[in-house]
Amino acid sequence: MNGPLRTMRRAARVEADVHVAVAIVGGGACGLTAALMLHDAGVDCVVLERDALPSGSTALSSGFIPAPGTRAQRAHGVTGDSAARFAADIQAKARGRAAPALVDAYATAIGPALDALQQRHGLEWLLLDGFLYPGHSVRRMHALPQKTGRALMAALHAAAGAAGIPIVTQAVVDTLVLDSAQRVLGIDYLRPDGRRETLGCAALLLACNGFGGNAQMVRTLLPEMAEARFCGHVGNDGSAIAWGRSLGARLRDLGGYQGHGSWVTPHGALMSWAVMMAGAVQVNGAGQRFHDETQGYSEAALHVLAQPQGIAWNLFDAPLLALARSFPDFCEAEAAGALRRCPSVAALADCIGCKPSVLQRTLDTVRAASAAPDGRVFARGLDAPYFAVKVTGALFHTQGGLDTAPDMRVLRRDGTPLANLLAAGGAAGGVSGDAASGYLSGNGLLSAVAGGYIAARTATTIVQSRKAPTS
């Protein structure tokens, strides 16, 4: 499996003009959350970002983060949620195959992380109301008012700027510098003009990426998605895995990923699965439903891709259109011409290219009060006028990577932790197990934000222990 050229070099000491307590590779939600928490703890850090402007997978996401016990949850009158309940939901979706210690760590940390970002850095969370995302037993999905990943990245970037956190952009980190005991001493990175620079550090956090943008890795590790459209960030090139192999680190859950069964085509936009959860349906080119949409949007990608030409249609009506229009991504897709309005079943069948009689039977089944053949129960049927959006299945980001302890330190193959190398977010194995069906809505940003929060706490301890006087 080819990956980017990511190496390590051995040295007794690092020769660098600049030394920092903590170096962070990657300026997405994980890296910036960690940087903000380090700033709050009085620990200096530098974020190194390969792009001219930090964006990553976060900017391409919906920006929704699940968390229990937050100020926003309480403000919306949601009670009875807890880290334990959230952890149970994560494991139920992953069929018990998610790493238990990490599940507990993330479920415990994410609420305090969101509250800290709100109270100390001005990120005002709202709670998405009116529906439950697949697998969640209570309303706990948080977003900024704009409801986009772009807005989340902009808010984190602005907060880092206000805190005076150095972010070195257009810095491609390609080499880790370690001593003979595998303690990280620093990193080498490449600048746009070809100059190479070295940064010394007391601790290093890999908050860089997964491998969804590396076609060869995907073909080898995720063959079921080899032909799927990749809708994540191109920087997801498998850097963390390449370093992990060089270090003899343990890898975990490489078969896990987040797919999505509602990528608007050919316009290239995400249609929120909230519309499915509220009563919309997916049909194939023959006008037939082919899966239970409430099971999850990640595994839905495989169901959609299995249909002729890998195409499906999202069908809904006027009340559901109003819900869809509350999400900016849908509004952009509608403005681009993705929405089809059909006054009758015959017109809808003509739009899809199927037989009206087949489509009518499908809609009659949806209207029935009893469970549909696949087990889904509909509270109401769809009424004319009907609306349709053409979609395909897509790969968004991978969920496997470096194995870590619950404190985010990277583990060797024998399970012992490296002293001062941490990984979180896309660089690390997440909490979705090793299959698409294990992905609980929001798991990607859960691991990014909670992982960054935990990593900052661990890095602070590492830095402070190095400063502590010896007797």
Image (cartoon, rainbow, N blue to C red):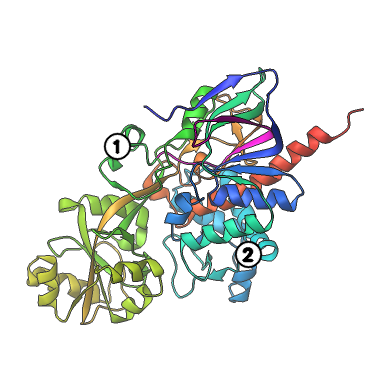
Residue 104 at least partly seen: no
Residue 187 x/y as whole percent = 60, 30
Decide which of tag 1 and tag 2 comes sooner along the chain: 2
Q: Which of 248 and 170 is in front in this view?
A: 170
Identified by mark 2, the residue type is: Gly
Quarter of the image that includes the N terminus: top left
Location of residue 225 (image quadrant): top left
Residue 448 x/y as whole percent = 54, 49
Mark 2 falls on what kind of element?
Answer: loop
Residue at coordinates 56% horizontally, 49% vertically from top-left? 30
Residue 285 at least partly seen: yes
Identified by mark 1, the residue type is: Pro
Task: Using the image, tell me which numbered label, if any, was put on residue 367.
Answer: none
Q: Does the magenta stretch include residue 263?
A: no
Task: Using the image, tell me which numbered label, if any, was put on residue 69.
Answer: 2
Looking at the image, residue 42 sits to the left or right of residue 298; the answer is: right
Quarter of the image that includes the C terminus: top right
Residue 432 x/y as whole percent = 46, 47
Mark 1 falls on what kind of element?
Answer: helix
Task: Using the image, tell me which numbered label, if any, was put on residue 223.
Answer: 1
> With respect to residue 159, does 195 lie above or below?
above
Residue at coordinates 63% horizontally, 55% vertically from top-left? 160
Q: Which residue is at the far front? A: 193
Q: What stretch is highlighted in magenta?
A: 191-211
